[in-house]
């Protein structure tokens, strides 16, 4: 009988794959999916701060974290687990602008001017108008701006930075002539939405305004100036700000609403109280009801952004709780109001449960459910903290690839870690979701901050599960005083 090599050869080829696919932790993926399904359900109504959706979110996380074995991390017996955060929502109310030439009123349609304030009420009487051109180049002296309204040409570009520079330089108000692509309707639609701040923030009463080009032509009628002449004047190399023969009475007010919301803070205690702490964080909030009929789906459920991050945060804690106790405390922070301007993270930094200098590393988790298994990691905040080399060492140990370059830093200001960086806390976001810029941009261009970000087929959890395992490894590394020694303060 002739000996056949076909079967043994086929078995051998099958047993030694050329490029083995990464082994997926399907059980962890299922656990992450369970968190996302609950937190992004319609029952939670989009997890808007200050609503019943918040209450359901905090109850859910509180039960999960308590069952894991965490203790309260607020270090405040009066507020166990839930740290209060008070917000103020401000929306424009009254807008008044009256203009005069040599004391005589100038008729300008009410719908040609919009005045806004960052405070409750701002009022200005008889202030002369100082034409400052496009506001670029050398800023006028403070004594030149004081008590005056800076008249700014839009130039077709967003002028908020130029407005803010003039106000900081001493102008009593700034009015921008909308001579570019923006219309007053655009500005009104954008600025009529509520602005949010921590109640502890002492906002000033800065006055800023916008006037249409047609409205400005009405103001200049009867003089030898036109908007075109002002534009030509400002383009000259020797341009200098000058007073116009105009003055203004300006007023703006806002309506204020107080919102009481909460961060939730848990802790896995370490063995050494003098060793500092490691912090993991993710924001729990989203936008609530964000669409109106006849839209089919009215809720911004926030499945990927950021029920996935909160689920990952919870599963990191669960896996750490099953292992040996670390030297350092590990804090877990689920923040409120990230979507309103990183306000929950800012509140944590302003009133922390431990001195911020004791946090040796902080890791944010946001929008993690995008990348497939085997995807490389990116560091959002690369080069901004002393953490990079140690993160790279953990990546080598875990056989995870870190992408080259710092392209992901384009998003550093759009996540909670930025608020902590402003308080000198070494905070980064390490994620496979940001390892492919085209992938994350596609999410931003489609479902991001829209009703489409809900639980539906196709949510990718392969990379998210691997990121959970990587963050567990980060915790064990940074929580070990032999690897990251205690630094005397």
Image: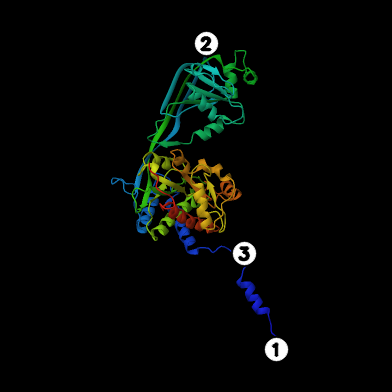
In percent of width and height, residue 472 lies at 45, 56
Q: Which residue is mark 2?
A: 102
Please tell me whether mark 1 sits on a helix, a strand or a loop.
Answer: loop
Q: Is residue 358 above or below residue 207?
A: below
**Mark 2, mark 3: which one is toward the viewer?**
3
Mark 2 or mark 3, which has the lower sequence index?
A: 3
The answer to whether the residue labelled 1 contacts the one labelled 3, judged by CB atoms less than 8 Å apart, is no
Mark 1 or mark 2, which has the lower sequence index?
A: 1
Q: Is residue 256 above or below residue 129?
A: below
Mark 1 or mark 3, which has the lower sequence index?
A: 1
Examine the image and state in which quarter residue 376 appears: bottom right
In percent of width and height, residue 92 lies at 46, 31
In percent of width and height, residue 71 lies at 33, 53
Name the side, left or right, on which 193 lies relative to 272.
right
Q: Which residue is mark 1?
A: 1
Q: CA distance from mark 2 to mark 3?
A: 82 Å
The answer to whether the residue labelled 2 contacts the one labelled 3, judged by CB atoms less than 8 Å apart, is no
Q: CA distance from mark 1 to mark 2?
A: 117 Å
Q: Is residue 294 visible?
A: no
Query: Could you say which is closer to the camera, residue 133 or residue 119?
Result: 133
The residue shown at (45%, 29%) is 118
**Mark 1, mark 2: which one is toward the viewer?**
1
Using a 10 Å C-alpha cutoff, classify the residue at mark 3 as few (fewer than 14 neighbours), some (14 to 19) or many (20 or more): few
Q: Which residue is mark 3?
A: 19
């Amino acid at each position: 009988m002739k000996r056949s090599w076909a079967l043994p050869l086929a078995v051998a080829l099958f047993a030694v794959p050329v490029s083995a696919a990464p082994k997926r932790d399907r059980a962890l993926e299922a656990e992450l999916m369970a968190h996302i399904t609950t937190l992004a359900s319609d029952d939670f109504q989009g997890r808007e701060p200050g609503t019943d959706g918040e209450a359901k979110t905090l109850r859910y996380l509180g039960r999960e974290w308590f069952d894991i074995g965490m203790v309260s991390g607020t270090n405040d017996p009066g507020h166990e687990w839930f740290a209060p955060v008070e917000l103020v929502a401000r929306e424009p109310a009254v807008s008044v602008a009256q203009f005069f030439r040599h004391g005589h009123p100038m008729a300008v349609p009410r719908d040609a001017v919009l005045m806004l304030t960052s405070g409750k009420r701002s009022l200005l009487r008889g202030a002369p108008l100082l034409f400052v051109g496009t506001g670029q180049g050398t800023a006028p002296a403070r004594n030149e701006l004081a008590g005056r309204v800076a008249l700014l040409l839009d130039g077709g570009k967003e002028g908020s930075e130029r407005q803010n520079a003039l106000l900081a330089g001493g102008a009593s108000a700034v009015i921008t002539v909308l001579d570019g692509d923006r219309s007053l309707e655009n500005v009104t639609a954008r600025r009529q939405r509520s602005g949010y701040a921590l109640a502890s923030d002492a906002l000033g009463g800065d006055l800023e305004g916008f006037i249409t080009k047609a409205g400005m032509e009405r103001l200049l009628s009867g003089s030898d100036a036109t908007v075109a002449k002002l534009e030509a004047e400002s383009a000259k190399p020797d341009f200098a700000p000058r007073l116009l023969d105009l003055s203004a009475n300006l007023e703006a007010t806002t309506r204020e609403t107080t919102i009481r919301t909460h961060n939730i803070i848990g802790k896995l205690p370490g063995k050494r109280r003098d060793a500092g702490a490691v912090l993991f964080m993710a924001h729990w909030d989203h936008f609530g009801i964000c669409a109106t009929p006849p839209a089919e789906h009215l809720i911004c459920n926030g499945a990927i952004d950021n029920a996935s991050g909160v689920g990952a945060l919870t599963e990191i804690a669960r896996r750490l709780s099953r292992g040996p106790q670390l030297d350092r405390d590990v804090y877990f922070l689920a923040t409120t109001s990230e979507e309103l301007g990183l306000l929950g993270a800012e509140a944590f930094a302003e009133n922390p449960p431990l001195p911020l200098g004791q946090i040796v590393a902080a890791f944010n988790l946001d929008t993690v459910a995008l990348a497939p298994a085997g995807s490389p990691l990116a560091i959002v905040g690369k080069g901004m903290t002393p953490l990079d080399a140690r993160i790279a060492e953990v990546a080598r140990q875990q056989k995870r690839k870190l992408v080259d370059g710092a392209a992901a830093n384009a998003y550093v200001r759009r996540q909670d870690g930025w608020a902590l960086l402003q308080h000198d806390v070494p905070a980064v976001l390490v994620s496979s979701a940001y390892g492919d810029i085209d992938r994350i941009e596609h999410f931003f261009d489609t479902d991001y901050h829209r009703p489409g970000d809900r639980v539906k087929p196709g949510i990718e959890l392969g990379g998210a599960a691997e990121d959970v395992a990587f963050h567990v490894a980060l915790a064990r590394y940074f929580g070990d005083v032999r690897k990251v020694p205690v630094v005397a303060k």
